[in-house]
Image (cartoon, rainbow, N blue to C red):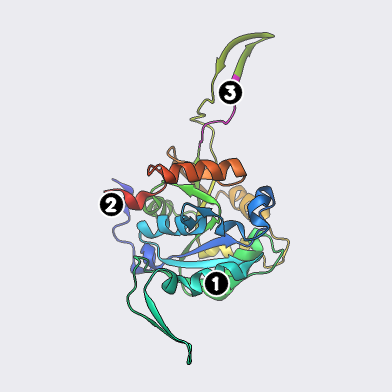
Amino acid sequence: MTVEQHCKGATVKNDPSNVPVFILCGGLGTRLKEETEVRPKPMVPVGDHPILWHIMRTYAHYGFNRFVLCLGYKGEAIKGYFLNYASMNSDFTVELKTNNVTVHSIDHEQNWEVTLAYTGELTMTGARVARAAERYLGDAEQFAVTYGDGLTNANLREAFLFHLSHGKIGTVLGTNPPSRFGQVIVDGSEVSRFEEKPEFSEEWINGGYFFFRRSFLPYLSSDESCVLERTPLVTLAADRQMAMFKHSGFWACMDTQRDLEQLNQAWASGQAPWAVWREK
């Protein structure tokens, strides 16, 4: 039985369109300082759009269209982007005397509900989720969490259905990207072979895309120092309440200028692996 078949009886509350996606957008982005001195990291452009847009397009492709953006550092730039989204993507008329704006048509495909939630300037990741969820989770039984700098071509609907199927509180996307460095295999002091940037098929890392049941909330704290990846996730794993959805395809995190350049090159080539919405 497939995961899809197993979950056919899921209630409407478990439909992706009813699952809020909390995106962490408030960090300082110090490792990409060339870009983040003037804007928050999620607003750094890949092609003609901020990386945040690419992340949201990927979720939307799989039916997720409710977003809660957890803002902090330079959050006003993200607010301005979405406040002006319609006018920047459509024809419009401005009556200068009254400042009335008439948008003639909506010339974009995005049917998103975007909540912009200020969660503190220096707040850590776990506290950002806790503060935003307290206000905007509503009665949702499931929610998603991700960062504002990671791209993947993982099937997020399949990941969500997998999450529903196993009954644990949390699911993390596990990825095994190839190493950036060649590996030297030694026998004692003798080099037996070189492996150029090997793929570690059985070594999994946190891919930064999560699904949680609302019963995860007690693991979080709204205290500014609460880091998602420390006590909350460590405790969840110790309680044997975390599962992994394994993904061997594309995954990338925009940590450095080199990462940004590679993502822009992929987008310019028309072969960006994460652009699943372009697939026929």
Which residue position is annotated with label 2?
Answer: 5
Residue 113's x, y, as percent?
A: 43, 71
Distance between the alpha carbons at the discs numbered 3 and 2: 42 Å
Q: Residues within 10 Å of mark 2 (few under 14, many from 20)?
A: few
Question: Along the polypeptide, which appears first: circle 2 or circle 1?
Answer: 2
Question: Along the polypeptide, which appears first: circle 3 or circle 1?
Answer: 1
Given residues 47 and 171, the one toward you in this image is 47
| Tag shown at residue 182 | 3
| Tag shown at residue 80 | 1
Judge depth for marks 3 and 2 and give the one in front.
Answer: 3
Is residue 181 highlighted in magenta?
A: yes
Residue 110's x, y, as percent?
A: 37, 66
Q: Quadrant of residue 71?
A: bottom right
Q: Is residue 116 above or below residue 149?
A: below
Task: Look at the image and tell me whether residue 82 can be seen.
Answer: yes
Question: Along the polypeptide, which appears first: circle 3 or circle 2?
Answer: 2
Q: Main secondary structure of the magenta part?
A: loop
Distance between the alpha carbons at the discs numbered 2 and 1: 42 Å
Residue extending farthest top: 190
Kind of residue at badge 1:
Gly
Given residues 252 and 132, the one toward you in this image is 252
Is residue 216 highlighted in magenta?
A: no
Instruction: Give the residues drawn in magenta, as a range.
Output: 176-183
| Tag shown at residue 136 | none
Distance between the alpha carbons at the discs numbered 3 and 1: 43 Å
Q: Residues within 10 Å of mark 3 (few under 14, many from 20)?
A: few
Residue 221's x, y, as percent?
A: 67, 65
